[in-house]
Every structure is written in structure tokens, then in C-alpha cells.
Image (cartoon, rainbow, N blue to C red):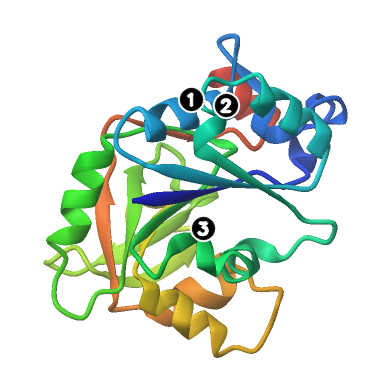
Amino acid sequence: MRALLLAAGLGTRLQPLTSYLPKCLVPIHGRPVLDYWLENLLDHGVEEVLINTHFMAPMVQKYLNQSSWLPYIKVVHEETLLGTGGTILRNRDFFKDETFLVAHADNLTIFDIQDFEDQHAARPSGVELTMMVFETPDPQSCGIVSLDSEGVVQAFHEKVAKPPGNLANGAVYILEPSVVAWMATLGKTQVDLSNEVIPCFLDKIFTFHNGLYHRDIGTMDSWIES
């Protein structure tokens, strides 16, 4: 399987850290968060990783040039941000019309990739993607999901005052090629995966529960706590 790590974001909520570093290189216990991602993916069966860049791209490229994983990485630079879905469409050939993983490289996530793949392979009939979910201690600040008895997403509750649970979208997905084909029918080069694609696949999204570790390090408080 191949993977896309989205690493082009501006990280404005993490200033002043991101005045000097791209968000994907923010250190966690002395290591860039991108380092955790590459180790987990490439040491556990992912054959090649595509990384998009934009903000402070030369710093990301310098880090990758010094990485032992460089032979298994392809970098694509976006002068104008394409959106998470737009990056997938622009690089559609990279995925070879096969199942692939996509993740935001600025979250800190520890999970078993083989378990994730196995869960996706065992998805109910008609499901076209599998979403990582996790239990959050602060459901009012997250996108909470409601599931049916089979673990298929029935509804999203985005940062509501009284969410119906604490199971949150981890923004890590395994997608079938059919999702990319559907995205292409939008006829757009800039596409947001979270807002324009995922909501259109209700009843077609299976879930993988990450019980190990997941944290959005998008704010200074969450970074300090990580």
C-alpha cells in the first residue's frame, strides 16, 4: 500500500513555533512529528510515501534529504494549496488505482497499520473508505461521529455544545480508488477532503478504533501536553 502525508499546512494556531518551523517539523520529545509518521509507515509495510509541501518547503526538503527513508519518499510542491482532496487528484497516478492511506502529518498518531488494513479489508459491503477514530477527552472541540451497529458512520457532529459521544474523527483514512474517481467528477482542482468529500460518503465510511494514541497538536496547549 502507498500513503499520502499532507504536510503543506501553515500551522497558524501553533505560532510562534510555526514562525520558524513548518508544522510537520514541530518537535515532539526531540523528534519532528513527521519523523514519527515515516517510521511508523515505512517500517510497517507501506511501500512508498507521497508528501506535499508548501509552507517553508525548503526546510521540509532538507529534513527529508537527511532521512534514511528518502528512497521511499516522493515530494510534490504546491505553489498554490490544492486542498487535501486536490492533492490526491493532482497525484492520482501515484496511487496506481489501488487502495491507499491518507493522513495529516501534523497530528501525532500511534497505531498498528496492519490492524488498520485488516479492518478496512473486513469492511461491510458498500463501504468505500475507513476512517480512524479515537476517544477524545474533549468532545466539544472535535468532530464527533455516530456509528451504527456495524461501525459505519451515520452522522458527524462538528464541535457542538452537547455531542452525542466522545468518538472523534482522527483524520486518517484508507480510501478505495472509487472515492478518487468520485472526486474527479467534481471538476475542480482545489478540493477539501473533510468538507467536500467525506460528508458525501455517509453510510459508506467504516471505522478503525485507534486505542493506542492520537493527538491533534494544532495548538500550543496540545503541543505542550503531547
For the point 60% across and 9% down, the residue is: 30
Q: Calculate the distance from the C-alpha at mark 1 to the C-alpha at mark 3.
A: 33 Å
Q: Amino acid at mark 3?
A: Ala
Residue 109 left/right relative to 190: left
Q: Is 39 situated left or right of 166 in this image?
A: right
Amino acid at dot 1: Tyr
Residue 123, picture quadrant: bottom left
How many angstroms separate mark 2 from mark 1 (CA)?
5 Å
- First along the sequence among labels 1 and 3: 1
* Residue 166 visible (yes or no): no
Q: Is residue 121 above or below residue 66?
A: below
Residue at 57% x, 30% y: name it: 70
Position in image of residue 36 (x %, y %): 48, 25
Q: Amino acid at mark 2?
A: Val
Location of mark 3 (residue): 161
Pointers 2 and 1 in contact (C-beta within 8 Å): yes
Going by the picture, which residue comes out furthest to the top? Answer: 30
In the rendered image, which residue does mark 1 sit on? 36
Tell me: 119 left or right of 5. Answer: left
Q: Secondary structure at mark 1?
A: helix
Which residue carries the number 2 mark?
33
Badge 2 element: helix
Say few, some or many: other residues with alpha carbon within 10 Å of mark 1 (under 14 / 14 to 19 / 20 or more).
some
Q: Decide which of tag 2 and tag 3 comes sooner along the chain.
A: 2
Which class describes the residues within 10 Å of circle 2: few (<14), some (14-19), or many (20+)?
A: many
The quarter of the picture where residue 169 lies is: bottom left
Q: Helix, strand, or loop for circle 3? A: loop
